[in-house]
Amino acid sequence: MQDIRFEKVYDDTAILAIGSLFRRVNNTQWGINLDLAPQAEIGSLRVSNLPVLARKRVLNPTQKHKSAGFRLSFTIENSATWQRRCLGNFPVSLAIRAMDKRQHCFCFFANNIQIYLPQLELARVLFLHDGYLSRSALEPDYLRSEFSIEYPGPNVARVNVLPSSSYPLKSLDDYESRRLLSWILIDPDARASYESIGRSQKLNGYEQSGYRHWDFEFTPPPLRSASFEVCIFPRMA
């Protein structure tokens, strides 16, 4: 999806902030609000584009752009120790763009640096690698209507794609797509984490003026002894 070109978005447009998700009450198609520079004709994109939507990323690039921020590598013990905060709680709140302030984050210390890790960014890296997984994550218990799991023997699991499934056939031919899907479906921690996205949307989303709105949040898997490489933005603006 890195090579996708977005209509009604100018060349070399930077994503400055990521806002809430929304859909019409009588529709199933979700969008996500974006703060773009230069300002585009549209202020949102479909949620199926989540795999390429990250803060400071450049859309429709015509040249190579230098990565924003500086890189930091660290290893965590367990995500269970993380605190939940919003970007608006960032110590230098004036550095946060208005659209970003309600975004949910995981807050923790790494290498003596206080990290505000946007929950959507972590979920994007873990799970939201394609349009199908990005869309289906928002619907509670969606996977149960798409796949069944059999265990024909010890340490053996078979994933069955149900006839009614909307999973793209081309993804079944792609090893990385199959590997990710199998992990989400079979690993108890991964599945519980992925399905927490839809549950959160159902519980915490709200309806207003004919639209359903939701600020992304989920429960991460334990991520025991997981290593991270992240880009740190000392100022978010």
Image (cartoon, grey):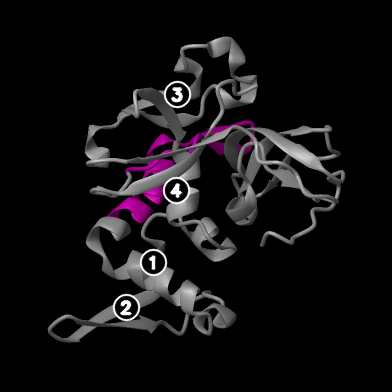
Q: Which comes sooner in the sequence, label 3 or label 2?
A: 3
Is residue 135 found left or right of 222 in the rendered image? Answer: right
Front position among marks 4 and 1:
4
- Which quarter of the figure has residue 13? top right
Q: Which residue is mark 4?
A: 123
> Residue 44 location in percent, x, y?
71, 41
Q: Is residue 85 above or below residue 34?
A: above
* Count of marks placed on residues: 4
**For the residue marked with disc 3, what is the amino acid?**
Cys
Q: CA distance from mark 2 to mark 4?
A: 23 Å
Specify start and end residues of the magenta stretch as a single range: 192-219
Front position among marks 2 and 4:
4
Q: Which residue is mark 2?
A: 148
* Residue 146 or residue 235, whichever sits in front: 235
Q: Which comes sooner in the sequence, label 2 or label 4?
A: 4
Badge 3 density bin: few <14, some 14–19, many ≥20, Cα 10 Å: some
**For the residue marked with disc 1, what is the amino acid?**
Leu
Quadrant containing the N terminus in the rendered view? bottom right
Quadrant containing the C terminus in the rendered view? top right
Q: Which residue is mark 1?
A: 143
Front position among marks 3 and 2:
3
**For the residue marked with disc 4, what is the amino acid?**
Ala
Q: Which comes sooner in the sequence, label 1 or label 2?
A: 1
Q: Which residue is mark 3?
A: 86
**Residue at x 75%, y 34% (from the top left corner):** 36
